[in-house]
Image (tube, rainbow, N blue to C red):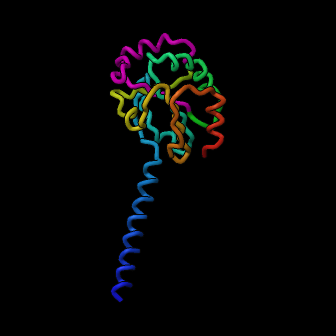
Amino acid sequence: MKAWIKIMLLLALLFVVGGCTSTEENAKNLAPSFELVDLEGNQQNLADYAGQKVYVKFWASWCSICLSGMEELNTLAGEENDFAVLTIVSPSSNAEKSSASFAKWFEGFPNAENITVLLDEGGTFFEEYGIIGYPTSVYIGSDGTLVKSQTGHFSNEEIKSTFETVQ
């Protein structure tokens, strides 16, 4: 009888621990929510894109690889896609200009009229998304899950191809 009680207690403990692990794993897969200001002063929240796939590019004004891909990114952002395109820069952190300096610099940037730039003042979401280098592409599913994060430049065709496998 005592052995039966020990087995039942062990199974109950495994059930509780298993349930907690599953919930923690699901929470880890959700993209960190953000509420950031764009260059026009509008608040943008990841929740505003609920039900949509979202492509987010983390980049910096000093990053030559980032800058060389901006015209291609502008084209992507101007096309009809089944995903939204956002970019995030981190003023006053990671060697980036201040918000005011960045905004002034970006005004004169050619071929960028379709690009939405969100300002992550101080790099809070840079940290939350685990960004280790620029540029970094983040793919978020329509259910809010963080599907993939990759450092480096990717062509528009590669980005679209990745989203073909994302729900």
- Per the rendered image, the range of residues in magenta is 85-113
Please state the total of marks drawn on the protein image.
Answer: 0
Q: In the figure, 70 relative to 31: above or below? A: above
The question of residue 145 being in magenta is answered with no
**Residue 157 vs residue 32: left or right?**
right
The quarter of the rendered structure image containing the N terminus is bottom left
Q: Looking at the image, which residue is at 37% across and 14% down?
A: 101
Q: Looking at the image, which residue is at 56% across and 34% down?
A: 84
The question of residue 109 being in magenta is answered with yes
- Residue reaching furthest top? 108
Q: In the figure, 30 relative to 149: above or below? A: below
Q: Looking at the image, which residue is at 53% across and 23% down?
A: 115
- When asked about the image quadrant of residue 36, the answer is top left
| Picture coordinates of residue 117, whole percent (x, y) | 47, 25
Q: In the figure, 8 relative to 95: above or below? A: below
| Picture coordinates of residue 124, whole percent (x, y) | 35, 33
- Residue reaching furthest front? 3
Q: Looking at the image, which residue is at 41% across and 16% down?
A: 103
